[in-house]
C-alpha cells in the first residue's frame, strides 16, 4: 500500500479480482494465490475517479499510504497537496461504515498539521490517535545499520527514524439523542434500567449522549431495547489486543524492485487485526505494489485496491494472481 503517481490520466476501466481458497502467509511479492472463497479486487485508475465504483458505507477500514509530497520519487510532488488529499479523504469518508476506521501514513509533520486541520474543517471524521512507527529499536534486525546514522553530525538535529499514522473514526453518539427524540423516550427511562449498587439513578446514560463514554456490551442492552441501536451503530470497531500503545516498533520493509517505500506487512496486519473481523473489507486507494493485499490474505480479510501507475498495477496482477 504505497504511494503512486497522482496526475489525472484517461484510463480504461479495469477491475481485477482474485478468489482465495484458504489462509496462507504471503509476502509482498508472493506467487499467485489460490482461488476460492475470499476475494481481493484490484482497480486500475485514478482513485478520484475510481472510488465511485466502491459502494458507500461498505468499507470497515481504510488504510492509505499516499504520496508524502517530499520528492521521494516522480509521483511524490503534488500541487495544492492538502486540498488534493483532503478531497480524496472526503470521498473515502463516504465509503466507510459508521463504525469504520481510517489510517493515513505520513512522515512530514508540517504537512500532517495542515492536513489534520483540513480534515477537521472539511469532514465528520474524529481524530483518535497519532501512531508513531518507530524503526530503530533494540530487537530490530536493522538496528546496527540505523545506529550508523545516529553518530553523524551533519544534520545538527536528531535523525528521524519514524513515520506517523493518523487514526480516525466517526463520532456516532449523536444517534442516541436523535433516536430518543424520534421515539419520544426520556433519558430517565433509559437510565433507570441500570441502577447503582444502592438502587439509585446514575448519569451513565447522559454520559453516553455527551460523548464522555461509549456504550459497553452491558449498557447497550437498554439502548437497544428503547432506541433500537446496536454497538455497531455507535461504537467504532476496535479489538484491544493488549500489546500496543501509540508507539509501534516495526522493522523497515525491504525495498522492492518495483517500489522504493513499501510498508511492512506485519505492521499492516496489526492495523487490520485491531479494527476489522474476518471477511470485513479493507480499502487502499494508493495500492502501490499491493502490500495491503498480503496483509489481508494473511488475516482472512477482503481487500479493494486502487492503483493508477501501470507498472505497479501490473506488479499487483502478477504477484497476487489477479486474472
Image: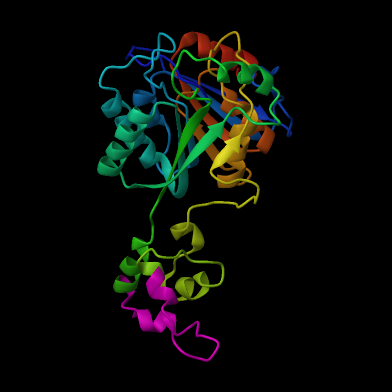
Q: How is the image coloured?
A: rainbow
Q: Residue at x 47, y 71 (%)?
A: 224
- Inspect the magenta stretch and tell me whether residue 187 lies in it: yes
Residue 4: image quadrant is: top left
Residue 159, horizontal then vertical, whole percent:
50, 22
- Residue 157 relative to residue 148: left or right: left
- Residue 94 relative to residue 157: left or right: left
Residue 299: image quadrant is: top right
Task: Write down the region rendered in magenta.
Answer: 182-207
Q: How many numbered callouts?
A: 0
Q: Quick one: 159 or 139, which is closer to the camera?
A: 159
Residue 216, horizontal then vertical, whole percent:
53, 66
Reply above or below: 23 against 142: below
Q: Quadrant of the image for the C terminus?
A: top right
- Inspect the magenta stretch and tell me whether residue 54 lies in it: no
Residue 282, horizontal then vertical, whole percent:
53, 36
Reply above or below: 280 against 265: below
Reply above or below: 321 against 225: above
Q: Residue at x 50, y 85 (%)?
A: 195
Residue 125, horizontal then vertical, whole percent:
36, 46
Q: Quick one: 73 or 282, which is closer to the camera?
A: 73
Residue 169 can be seen, yes or no: yes
Residue 142 can be seen, yes or no: no
Q: Residue at x 32, y 37 (%)?
A: 90
Q: Residue at x 39, y 15 (%)?
A: 76
Q: Quick one: 71 or 75, which is closer to the camera?
A: 71
Amino acid at each position: 500500500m504505497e504511494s503512486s503517481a497522482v496526475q489525472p490520466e484517461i484510463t480504461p476501466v479495469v477491475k481485477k479480482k482474485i478468489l482465495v481458497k484458504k489462509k496462507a502467509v504471503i509476502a509482498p511479492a508472493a506467487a499467485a494465490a489460490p482461488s476460492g472463497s475470499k476475494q481481493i479486487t484490484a482497480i486500475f485508475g485514478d482513485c478520484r475517479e475510481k472510488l465511485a465504483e466502491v459502494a458507500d458505507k461498505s468499507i470497515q477500514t481504510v488504510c492509505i499510504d499516499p504520496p508524502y509530497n517530499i520528492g521521494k520519487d516522480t509521483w511524490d510532488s503534488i500541487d495544492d497537496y492538502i486540498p488534493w488529499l483532503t478531497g480524496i479523504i472526503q470521498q473515502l469518508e463516504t465509503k466507510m461504515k459508521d463504525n469504520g476506521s481510517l489510517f493515513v501514513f505520513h512522515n512530514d509533520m508540517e504537512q500532517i498539521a495542515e492536513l489534520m486541520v483540513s480534515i477537521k474543517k472539511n469532514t465528520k471524521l474524529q481524530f483518535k490517535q497519532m501512531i508513531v512507527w518507530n524503526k530503530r529499536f533494540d530487537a530490530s534486525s536493522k538496528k546496527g545499520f540505523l545506529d550508523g546514522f545516529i553518530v553523524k553530525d551533519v544534520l545538527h538535529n536528531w535523525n528521524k527514524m519514524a513515520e506517523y499514522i493518523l487514526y480516525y473514526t466517526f463520532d456516532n453518539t449523536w444517534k442516541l439523542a436523535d433516536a430518543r427524540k424520534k421515539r419520544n423516550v426520556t433519558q430517565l427511562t433509559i437510565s433507570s434500567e441500570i441502577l447503582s449498587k444502592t438502587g439509585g439513578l446514575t448519569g451513565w446514560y447522559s454520559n453516553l449522549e455527551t460523548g464522555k463514554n461509549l456504550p459497553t456490551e452491558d449498557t447497550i442492552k437498554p439502548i437497544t431495547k428503547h432506541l433500537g441501536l446496536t454497538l455497531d451503530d455507535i461504537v467504532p470497531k476496535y479489538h484491544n489486543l493488549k500489546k500496543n500503545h501509540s508507539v509501534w516498533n516495526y522493522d523497515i520493509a525491504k525495498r522492492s524492485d518495483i517500489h522504493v517505500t513499501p510498508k511492512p506487512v506485519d505492521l499492516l496486519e496489526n492495523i487490520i487485526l485491531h479494527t476489522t473481523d474476518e471477511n470485513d473489507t479493507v480499502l487502499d486507494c494508493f495500492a502501490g505494489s499491493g502490500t495491503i493485499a498480503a496483509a489481508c490474505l494473511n488475516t482472512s480479510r477482503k481487500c479493494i485496491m486502487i492503483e493508477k501507475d501501470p507498472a505497479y498495477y501490473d506488479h499487483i496482477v502478477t504477484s497476487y494472481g489477479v486474472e
